[in-house]
Image: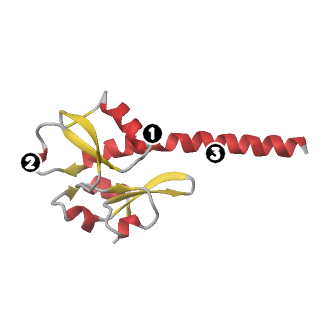
Amino acid sequence: MKKLSILITLFISISICCNAQVPKLQSIFIYNFTKYIEWPASYTSGNFIIGVLGQSPLTKELNNLSKTKKVLNQPIVINKFKNISTLIITEKKGMAKQGAGINFVIVNNKQKFELNKANISKYNLKVSPNLINLAILVQ
């Protein structure tokens, strides 16, 4: 019986550890997405704004990332928004079909992402074929 409780405790600890790393991993994905999107010329000067809608553990990780990284030589600024902005990235099942451009999903215990080209195109953004090849395409 002790082996079973130790195994269960170990499994729970591993799950908590891995789940705690998800926001950090997702923030790195978001930063890398910026490299594969062709932004309109008007977006390439001043600060590069990454908006977070509502409360999210991603905010802390994105703020940490913004201290050391840039997008196209632009400083990264993390802003909280009440309304949805340009490239919409979500992490809820079905959101790529409901308006998000990119949606995080877990497939076979691996972090993956869905991409909806039509939703991204609504905001006059073009997606690199390299990013498309890595994505799970959704319409």
Spatial CA distance of label 3 from label 2 is 43 Å
Disc 1 on helix, strand or loop? helix
Where in the figure is residue 14, as x and y percent of width and height?
Answer: 66, 41
User: Can residue 37 be seen in this snapshot?
Assistant: yes
Q: Residue at x 34, y 46 (%)?
A: 30
Name the disc covering residue 24, or none. Answer: 1
Mark 3 nearby-residue class (10 Å; few <14, some 14–19, many ≥20)? few
From the viewer's perspective, is 114 left or right of 69?
right
Depicted 55 relative to depicted 69: above or below: below
Q: Quadrant of the C terminus?
A: bottom left
Q: Is residue 138 visible?
A: no
Q: Which of marks 3 and 1 is nearer the N terminus?
A: 3
Q: Which residue bears the numbered disc 2?
A: 41
**Marks 3 and 1 close (CB-CB < 8 Å):** no
Question: Regarding mark 3 in the picture, which secondary structure is present there?
Answer: helix
Tell me the kind of residue under disc 1: Lys
Secondary element under disc 2, as helix, strand or loop, is helix
